[in-house]
Amino acid sequence: MAYDKFNILTSSAVPLPIENVDTDQIIPARFLKATKREAFGDNLFRDWRYNGDDTPKADFVLNDATYSGKILVGGKNFGSGSSREHAAWAVYDYGFRAVVSSFFADIFKGNCLNIGVLPVQVSPEFADIIFKAIESDPKTELEINLPEQTITLLATGQKESFDISGYKKDNMVNGFDDIDYLQNIKEEIVTFAEKQLI
């Protein structure tokens, strides 16, 4: 399933300075029955966003109109816990195109890359700078440049580089998942296979 191409994202950000946010908090287990990537955003952080009677919790950041944007800035060890890919689906379906953290759980990071959410790992020091900038000005913008592999706090010009595998980077720039990638080189695969039969 193809997704949005990712090149340069400039956006304000939603801060969630909580460490060890696990996948059950991102999308509770009771919402994992569906197999299509639809409507998961409605239940992103469900138990943190809503009371038992489905009324919004006013003190949770996603219910605070002060904050908006396509970038979620999380605390250290974001996406820990079980390997459910639905957690990445929920992040994407809600509208986030990048998650910034000083450390990601490996499986969550991989799941994000597979469906078009860019996990940007920064140093703890730079993460702290970002959180303070958003606290000072909720409309402050970040620029995430995938081709250059940099994240910049536009108000001050402070910048840091991040790592990503060349294969996943190329897929995100083109909006490919793994199957799209194979479809894109189908002719090359057929040509190679035919040569093996000669």
Image (cartoon, grey):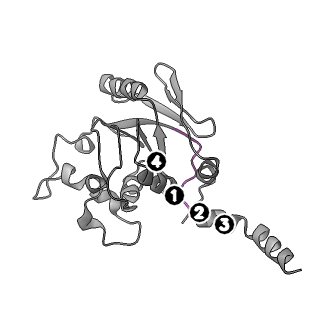
Q: In the displayed structure, would residue 56 be above or below residue 84?
A: above
Residue drawn at x 83%, y 76% as measured from the top left? 196
Place of residue 35 in the rendered image (x, y in percent of width and height, measured from the top left): 39, 72
Q: Are marks 3 and 2 in contact (CB under 8 Å)?
A: yes
Residue that label 3 marks: 182
Few, some or many residues within 10 Å of mark 2 (<14, 14–19, 20+):
some
- Identify the magenta region: 2-9
Query: Depth check: 93 or 47 in front?
Result: 47
Inspect the image, locate mark 4, and give the three-letter code of the amino acid beneath it: Arg
Of all residues shown, which one is farthest toward the bottom? 197
Q: Give the percent coordinates (x, y) of residue 6.
A: 57, 47
Q: Is residue 16 left or right of residue 159?
A: left
Disc 2 marks a residue whose amino acid type is Asp
Which residue has dot 2 on it?
A: 178
Say which label, 1 or 2, has the lower sequence index.
Answer: 1
Earlier sequence position, callout 1 versus callout 4: 4
- Choose mark 1 or mark 4, whichever is in front: 1
Q: Main secondary structure of the magenta part?
A: loop
4 or 2: tag closer to the N-terminus: 4
The Cα atoms of the two marked residues, 3 and 4, are separated by: 23 Å
Question: Is the residue 48 above or below the residue 54 in the image?
Answer: above
- What amino acid is labelled 3 in the image? Leu
Mark closer to the observer (3, 4): 3
Q: CA distance from mark 4 to mark 2?
A: 18 Å
Residue at the spot 54% in from the left edge and 54% down from the top edge: 4
Is mark 1 in CB contact (under 8 Å) with mark 2? yes
> What's the distance in space between the residues labelled 3 and 1, CA to CA?
14 Å
| Closer to the camera in the image, 106 or 1 | 106
Q: Which mark is residue 114?
A: 1
